[in-house]
């Protein structure tokens, strides 16, 4: 492999490489469902969100477009600071999505200043966390705070493609409502999966568009998958409980039987004892 | 691996499995560009088209949506026969894309009849070649012919997800203008890549929409990648030619030098010969 100093995909983690060489899991098997649910749980932890993380087949760019098209309706006003190649992409995606976009330009290498985004009248702010094209890290918490002071109803969306599992990420704690990422950077997995993390606040305000990008439909499908697994788990648990109860009953019955035998034995011993006493009494009575 | 009798992904080809276990190629290396171009060329052969095949990161469903959103503008009328789960999906995608959709229902297991699609006034016809959900194979050539007799300007789009490299596929020869497919069926590769094949006719009539799905932008990017590779190849060829010319010149110079030496040798021999003759003549002259 060549070593190129570009913001390309990272080397794969040996475990990822090993997993790739194994036969594929059929997506309708229980094993695949379990892997999927576990992955979603781990991603929720990685984004540190109480909301949801959706896994999409596609690149980080697809996740960025899904974020924009599911959070904002055409005609809504958004603020997009541009300070590198990927914030430029966010700007292009917002334009194509039919949003009214205000662009704030910064020299490449800089990051936006909180005072610049402290402006009223916007439905959203789109930020790139780690601008891979320049290496600059934006101060998301300060920017989100400044924006939301002026736009309490506004939503903050962030590109976290190269910051997830590399830098500090905590969705709600940072004031971020939705974030996009991918599999080929901090996760050290091959490219091909996009992630959209949605805070509880973002989940309440989805405005889905598109077929492949419709996150509401995707949430429903993933919830159904989860429900099916839980149903199966519940059924298995019920069967296990019934089986355990049956065994317990059997054990109790055996105990009762044993107790009954012990009682009979004990009563026999007591009777024998009393008979012994009676015998002794009779002997005493006969003694003058 | 479990064996499920569902239309899921196929087992991987051993070569695909082996390729997956190798370190990833960085997408900006020349080696990656060569693999990419070779793959596009092979896909063109597989679809048997003189047009283009675009490789997208996503599923077959993404390719279907890309086909619909790049061939037809909102408000255009399309005919969608529904005879299984995947033609149902084509119908839903066309609706979401803002097309005016006429749906033709058939019992699952059947395929549409050519006479049913021989109706005027449509910009397009969307067909599923092999309806994976029922196993039925639609007669694309007969359907495309019947539709185009009534709609000479109409475009025929086909879902070839499970027919590519499995059944008979020949894009233009079948009267199909664009087709969608994926990597996880006949190709015996893992899921994650979608293909859109575009006939020369479809290429002339693209009406791109969306950011990720914008096939015109994708065609441009892929053409640039191709041009860059060709430029590099041309440069290498030029350098090779110059090098060969320099060697040839060196060889010719050596030959001339050798000829010059041979000439000198020859002249020397001729001179020696003539001197011999002269000597003999002088001896003869002296003889009385």
Image (spheres, coloured by chain):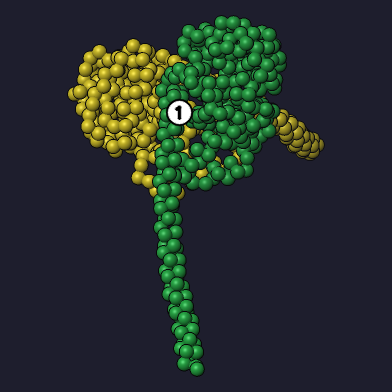
Chain colours: A yellow, B green
Near-viewer residue (B229 or B157): B229
Q: Quick check: A261 left or right of B70?
A: right
Residue drawn at point x = 44 percent, y = 30 percent: A59
Q: Quadrant of residue B216?
A: top left
Q: Quadrant of the C terminus of chain A?
A: top right
Q: Is residue A22 above or below residue B252?
A: above
Total residue callouts: 1
Q: Quadrant of residue B260?
A: bottom left
Give residue A132's position: percent from left, percent from top: 33, 36
Q: Is residue B250 above or below residue A37?
A: below
Q: Is residue B108 visible?
A: no
| Chain identifier of the residue bearing label 1 in the image | B
Q: Quick check: B234 left or right of B67?
A: left
The residue most toward the left is A115
Give residue A192's position: percent from left, percent from top: 48, 33
Q: Is residue B156 above or below residue B246?
A: above
Near-viewer residue (A103 or B269): B269
Give residue B24's position: percent from left, percent from top: 48, 43
Residue drawn at point x = 44 percent, y = 76 percent: B267
The residue most toward the bottom is B288
Residue drawn at point x = 41 percent, y = 41 percent: B231
Give residue B14's position: percent from left, percent from top: 62, 43
Q: Quadrant of residue A174?
A: top left
Near-viewer residue (A208 or B181): B181
Q: Which residue is mark 1?
A: B219
Q: Is residue A175 above or below residue B17?
A: above
Residue drawn at point x = 25 percent, y = 13 percent: A121
């Amino acid at each position: 492999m060549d070593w190129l100093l570009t913001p390309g995909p990272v080397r794969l983690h040996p475990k990822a490489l090993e997993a790739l060489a194994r036969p594929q899991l059929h997506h309708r098997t229980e094993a695949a469902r379990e892997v999927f649910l576990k992955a979603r749980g781990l991603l929720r932890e990685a984004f540190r969100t109480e909301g949801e993380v959706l896994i999409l087949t596609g690149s980080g760019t697809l996740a960025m477009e899904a974020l924009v098209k599911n959070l904002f309706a055409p005609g809504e006003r958004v603020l997009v600071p541009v300070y590198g190649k990927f914030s430029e992409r966010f700007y292009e995606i917002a334009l194509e999505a039919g949003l009214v976009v205000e662009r704030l330009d910064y020299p490449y290498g800089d990051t936006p200043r909180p005072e610049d985004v402290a402006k009223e009248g916007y439905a959203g702010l789109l930020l790139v966390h780690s601008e891979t094209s320049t290496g600059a890290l934006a101060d998301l918490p300060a920017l989100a705070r400044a924006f939301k002071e002026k736009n309490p109803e506004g939503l903050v969306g962030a590109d976290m493609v190269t910051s997830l599992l590399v830098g500090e990420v905590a969705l709600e704690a940072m004031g971020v409502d939705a974030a996009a990422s991918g599999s080929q950077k901090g996760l050290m997995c091959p490219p091909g999966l996009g992630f959209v993390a949605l805070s509880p606040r973002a989940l309440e305000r989805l405005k889905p568009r598109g077929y492949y990008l419709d996150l509401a439909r995707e949430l429903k499908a993933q919830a159904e998958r989860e429900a099916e697994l839980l149903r199966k788990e519940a059924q298995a648990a019920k069967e296990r409980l019934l089986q355990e109860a049956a065994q317990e009953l059997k054990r109790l019955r055996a105990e009762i039987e044993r107790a009954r035998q012990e009682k009979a034995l004990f009563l026999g011993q007591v009777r024998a004892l009393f008979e012994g006493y009676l015998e002794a009494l009779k002997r005493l009575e006969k003694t003058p």
